[in-house]
Amino acid sequence: MPGWLASIPLLFAADAAEPTVSPLTQLLPFLPVVVLFYFIMIRPQQQQERKRREMIDLLKKNDKVLTAAGIYGTVVSIDKDNDKVVLRVDDDRGVKLAFSKSSVVKVLEASTDKADNKEV
């Protein structure tokens, strides 16, 4: 039994007669995995974030939106300097709430009236 245990390290030993392979050549098969990871994970996420930024930049008065907190509202005003948007959440009582522009996750209905596009 000790005879076969003593031969285990020989299984992992490199043969001195074999030429050594450069580490770059050994890493070459992993290059397609890195490229595939980029196109499956990173690039779609960058495109999605770009679309979200464009949506936030195109917000205008009277757009109906959904916030990250799940609150539906209508844009009353947009303050681009302070990154703030004021939403009317209750038309009957005139309840208005201020949010960060980044909390808007979806534009449900964009306003089409040209007179309403003026920012306050």
Image: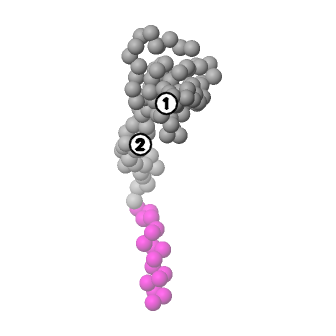
SS for dot 1: strand
Identify the amino acid type marked 1. Gly
Mark 2 surroundings within 10 Å by alpha-carbon count, few (fewer than 14), some (14 through 19), many (20 or more): few
**Residue 21: horizontal and vertical position, in percent?**
42, 52
Residue at image position (53%, 21%) is: 76
Residue in the foreground of this view, choosing between 20 and 95: 95
Q: Which mark is residue 73?
A: 1
**What is the magenta range?**
1-17
**Residue 58: horizontal and vertical position, in percent?**
46, 20
Residue in the foreground of this view, choosing between 99 and 13: 99
Q: Are marks 1 and 2 in contact (CB under 8 Å)?
A: no
In this view, the residue farthest toward the top is 115
Residue 47 placement: quadrant? top left
| Up/down of 22 relative to 110, above or below | below
- Pick the quarter of the image with the N terminus: bottom left
Residue at image position (46%, 21%) is: 62
Distance between the alpha carbons at the discs numbered 1 and 2: 33 Å
| Up/down of 104 relative to 114, above or below | below
Visible residue check, residue 25: no
Q: Is residue 2 magenta?
A: yes
> Mark 1 vs mark 2: which is more N-terminal?
2
Q: Which mark is residue 41?
A: 2
| Up/down of 29 relative to 92, above or below | below
